[in-house]
Image: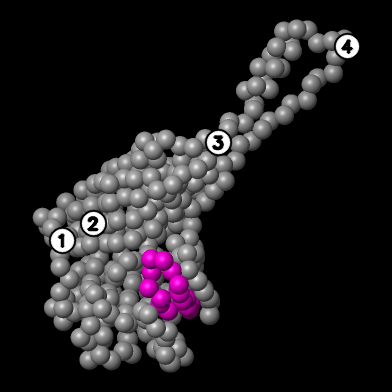
């Protein structure tokens, strides 16, 4: 099953024009004219150019290396300042500082490029060297890059597939939901929630911690990730509720969905306050994604950002009002 993530304009060149100073002579000295011509030539804006593949690849390599080096300034230099994920990327770097990771890029391929935008497919392997609980993984996706002041930077990212890896870098086969345990640094934050869901109907299918986020995915008892029809997902982002974290999450979700879906997408915010946002979306007739519908609630508790999502695959949500009530009663 493909998952959405995110990570995240027009190149602006200022043209300075100077007025000629007044002169009592009808003609300017030739050397003054030459200086003026040189100045005007220097002030002409650079023409936008289609980037070389290696130029784009280098941006991605620096992006990964600076994250491993925990060089925040160098990493942020690879992110477009108008990316929807710009601010959340800073928060993520603070959270990932607890880890030492070995990250490798492979299979880089330019899907398309122009003077204004480029899309680069990638495969990224992330292995923990040291730090708290972390799920090693192989991720496949596409980065969108745009120029900023003549420099190409990452504007957005689309994750198409995430594969969990063991400590030897081998793929972990997804087992039955009942074999999964919720263990890790953030597990207690999720288990402390009061959730009005039938524990006999919903069983833990996957628990993962990565880059400062805990994710618990619950399946209908008897279903697997190969054939599920409904999914209940709980995210926790420790200490991320302040400074617009709730709004940032929902905005990033909507922006990334809009950029990735080529079918019909409907996204609505149903309720919104400083402490929570309740939203819904549906996807139909997309070339890569199943038809699906989701209702979700992002809210603050004890300074942490929680997101509770109920998703149906290849069918619409029945009793939507009942599900909205359940999401509101998660405490």
* The magenta stretch spans residue 280: yes
The residue depicted at 46 percent of the width and 40 percent of the height is 152
Gap in angstroms between the C-alphas marked 1 and 4: 80 Å
Indicate the secondary structure of the residue bearing disc 3: loop
- Among the two numbered marks 2 and 4 on one chain, the one whose residue lies closer to the N terminus: 4
Using the image, tell me which numbered label, if any, was put on residue 294: none
The percent coordinates of residue 85 (x first, y second) are: 45, 57
Q: How crowded is mark 4: few (under 14 residues within 10 Å), some or many (20 or more)?
A: few
* Residue occupied by mark 3: 48
Q: If you read the primary sequence from the N terminus, does the residue marked by circle 1 or circle 4 appear first? A: 4
Q: What element carries label 2?
A: strand
Q: How far apart are marks 3 and 1 (CA)?
A: 43 Å
Spatial CA span between label 2 and label 4: 72 Å
Q: In this view, does 224 lie above or below 109?
A: below
Query: SS class of the residue under badge 4?
Result: loop
**Badge 1 element:** loop
**Drawn side of residue 99 relative to residue 109, left or right:** left
Q: Position of residue 95 (x, y in %)?
A: 32, 57
Look at the image and give the residue range highlighted in magenta.
277-294
Q: Residue at label 1?
A: 171
Say how many tags the image has.
4
Residue at label 4? Answer: 26
* Residue nearest the observer in this picture, 307 or 200: 200
- Pointers 1 and 4 in contact (CB under 8 A)? no
The C terminus, quarter of image: bottom left
**Magenta stretch holds residue 73:** no
Q: Which of 153 and 288 is in front in this view?
A: 288
Q: Which residue is drawn at 74% across and 26% down?
A: 18
Q: Quadrant of the N terminus?
A: bottom left
């Amino acid at each position: 099953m493909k998952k959405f993530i995110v990570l995240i304009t027009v190149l602006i060149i200022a043209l300075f024009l100077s007025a000629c100073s007044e002169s009592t002579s009808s003609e300017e000295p030739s050397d003054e004219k030459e200086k003026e011509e040189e100045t005007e030539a220097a002030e002409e804006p650079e023409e936008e150019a289609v980037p070389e593949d290696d130029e784009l690849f280098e941006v991605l390599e620096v992006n990964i290396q600076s994250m491993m080096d925990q060089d925040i300034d160098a990493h942020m230099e690879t992110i477009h300042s108008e990316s929807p994920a710009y601010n959340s990327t800073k928060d993520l770097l603070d959270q990932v500082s607890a880890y030492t990771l070995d990250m490798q890029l492979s299979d880089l391929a330019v899907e398309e490029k122009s003077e204004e935008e480029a899309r680069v497919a990638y495969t990224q392997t992330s292995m923990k060297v040291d730090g708290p609980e972390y799920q090693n993984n192989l991720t496949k996706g596409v980065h969108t890059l745009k120029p900023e002041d003549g420099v190409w930077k990452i504007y957005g990212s689309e994750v198409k597939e995430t594969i969990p890896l063991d400590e030897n870098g081998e793929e972990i086969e997804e087992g039955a939901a009942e074999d999964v345990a919720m263990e890790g640094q953030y597990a207690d934050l999720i288990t402390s929630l009061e959730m009005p869901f039938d524990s006999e109907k919903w069983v833990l299918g996957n628990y993962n911690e990565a880059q400062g986020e805990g994710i618990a995915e619950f399946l209908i008892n008897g279903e697997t990730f190969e054939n599920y029809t409904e999914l209940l997902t709980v995210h926790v982002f420790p200490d991320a509720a302040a400074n617009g974290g709730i709004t940032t999450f929902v905005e990033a979700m909507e922006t990334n969905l809009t950029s990735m879906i080529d079918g019909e997408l409907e996204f609505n915010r149903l309720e919104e306050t400083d402490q929570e946002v309740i939203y819904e979306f549906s996807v139909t007739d997309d070339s890569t994604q199943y038809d699906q519908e989701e209702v979700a609630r992002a809210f603050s508790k004890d300074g942490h950002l929680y997101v509770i999502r109920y998703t149906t695959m290849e069918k619409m949500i029945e009793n939507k009002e009942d599900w909205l009530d359940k999401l509101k009663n998660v405490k």
